[in-house]
Image (spheres, rainbow, N blue to C red):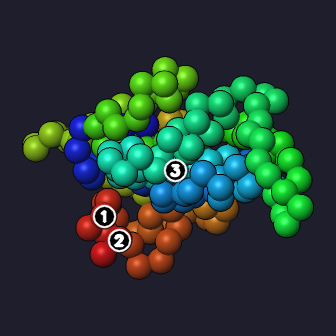
Amino acid sequence: MNSPTKRCGKSRLLEILEQIVARPWYMLRPTEAILFRKIERDRPTLLIDEVDAIFTDKSGNTEGLRAVLNGGNRRGAKVPRCVGERMELVDFSIYAATVLAGIGRALPETVRDRSIPIALVRKQRGEKRPMCGNDVEPRPSGKPSGENRRARGVLLRIDGRRARPGRLLGRPGVARGDCGRRRDA
């Protein structure tokens, strides 16, 4: 998932995915060693944010990480490593569902080629968007439309609590329509 600039919703989408995917592991700048050990032990869904910072690093320390991400899209893919004082050979599984989020086209071509791209864009100045959170506009009858009820149902499943006006995803103290990073501050 990428965007041309900051504040397009990449981190927010990862936060939402964290609530609905199996065994989520949200992280920033993992090392190769941590990544393959965590995958072997827990079989998580990888939610890696700020990948632009990882792959624009000119030190060359990201080649191992790139290799793990390249091979991790195939069942049975492994990386061999020597482990322990006796240097025993261990094959670590690296197959994992992975979501990568960053600005621009920072992903190496080999990783991008194995990906399903999702492009996010910022709202244009003056562009009207529905308000965030549990804002469900009632019909003239006073009841939410079927589409809005379905949307509210998704929010309820993610949050697990009853939606109330004036709250975003059921989080207290968040005003209606108060969205994005400015709300987080």
Closer-to-camera residue (36/42):
36
Which x, y percent locates residue 97?
A: 67, 38
User: SS of the residue at dot 2?
Assistant: helix
Q: CA distance from mark 1 to mark 3?
A: 19 Å
* Residue displayed at 32% across by 47% down: 58
Q: Compared to 63, does 135 lie above or below?
A: below
Choose the circle earlier in sequence order: 2 or 3: 3
Residue 48 numbered tag: 3
Which x, y percent locates residue 99?
A: 54, 41
Q: Name which quarter of the figure residue 2 lies in.
A: top left
User: In which quadrant of the rendered image does the C terminus lie?
Assistant: bottom left
Instruction: Specify whether 10 is left or right of 97.
Output: left
Kindly identify the amino acid type of the residue bearing the numbered disc 2: Asp
User: SS of the residue at dot 3?
Assistant: strand
Which x, y percent locates residue 169?
A: 51, 62
Choose the circle earlier in sequence order: 1 or 3: 3
Q: Which residue is mark 2?
A: 184
Instruction: Specify whether 7 is left or right of 18.
Output: left
Identify the residue at the far front of this view. 86
Closer-to-camera residue (11/41):
41
Which x, y percent locates residue 179?
A: 32, 60
Identify the residue at the far left of this view. 126
Q: CA distance from mark 2 to mark 1?
A: 5 Å
Q: Compared to 128, does 172 lie above or below?
A: below
User: In which quadrant of the rendered image does the N terminus lie?
Assistant: top left
Q: Which residue is mark 1?
A: 181
Kindly identify the amino acid type of the residue bearing the numbered disc 1: Arg
Q: CA distance from mark 2 to mark 3?
A: 20 Å
Identify the residue at the far top of this view. 113
* Residue displayed at 82% across by 30% down: 76
